[in-house]
Amino acid sequence: MTQPPPLMWRAKGELVVGLHRAGGVPDPLWKEFQATLRSGPVRRTLVITYRDATISALQRQDMIETARKHLDVFAVAFESMLTRGVLTALSWFLPTLAVFRVDELPAAIRFAGRDDEQRAWLSATSDALHRELGLR
């Protein structure tokens, strides 16, 4: 059985929901994710991270640049305290970033979605990604 990638995401219109389950993200996968975030319609993003999910310093800088130039709303729900420290530091540079614990995922979805229709899609897509990655 093939192991799923450490980062998976889905996009619809101005929305992206991503789930980063563990470990680092290979550069080709990271570039594909960034290309999605930089695409014209995407403006609102929810990323959920688990366990020892990490990104490199260069990827972190890339994310800051993408968020500054392309995202109006950027919500991150995390599980790891290490991730919390990184996100807190990132929030100093990104006023559009809101940080939530994984157990606050409903609040992160409310923040990321513009309206009930978007929130319903974010919730359903988050659930589907969790199932695909074996996290639910």
Image: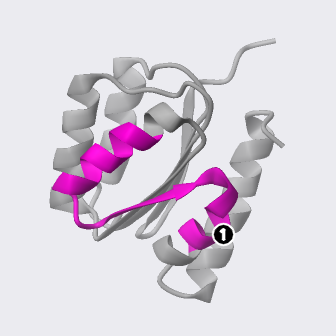
Q: In this view, does 44 lie to the left or right of 104?
A: left
Query: Residue 132 location, x and y as percent?
Result: 76, 38
Residue 106, magenta (yes or no): yes
Q: Quadrant of the N terminus?
A: top right
Query: Residue 85 location, x and y as percent?
Result: 38, 39
The reply to whether residue 38 is in sight is no
Between 60 and 27, the one lying in front of the other is: 60
Query: Residue 96 location, x and y as percent?
Result: 28, 67
Task: Identify the residue shown where x is 64% and y is 52%.
Answer: 102
The amino acid on which the numbered mark 1 sits, given as a three-letter code, is Pro
Is residue 52 depicted above or below 43 in this figure?
A: above
Residue reaching furthest top?
1
Q: In this view, does 16 lie to the left or right of 43?
A: right
Residue 9 occupies quadrant: top right
Residue 70 occupies quadrant: bottom left
Residue 103 occupies quadrant: bottom right
Residue highlighted by disc 1? 106
**SS at mark 1 in the image:** helix
Residue 2, magenta (yes or no): no
Q: Is the magenta stretch mostly helix, strand or loop?
A: helix
Task: Identify the residue shown where x is 68% and y is 76%.
Answer: 120
Q: In which quarter of the image is the C terminus?
A: top right
How packed is label 1: few (under 14 Cα within 10 Å), some, or many (20 or more)? some
Is residue 84 depicted above or below 27 in this figure?
A: below
- Please report the bounds of the magenta region as a residue range: 84-109
Task: Identify the residue shown where x is 49% and y is 75%.
Answer: 111
Query: Residue 26 location, x and y as percent?
Result: 41, 17
Between 90 and 74, the one lying in front of the other is: 90
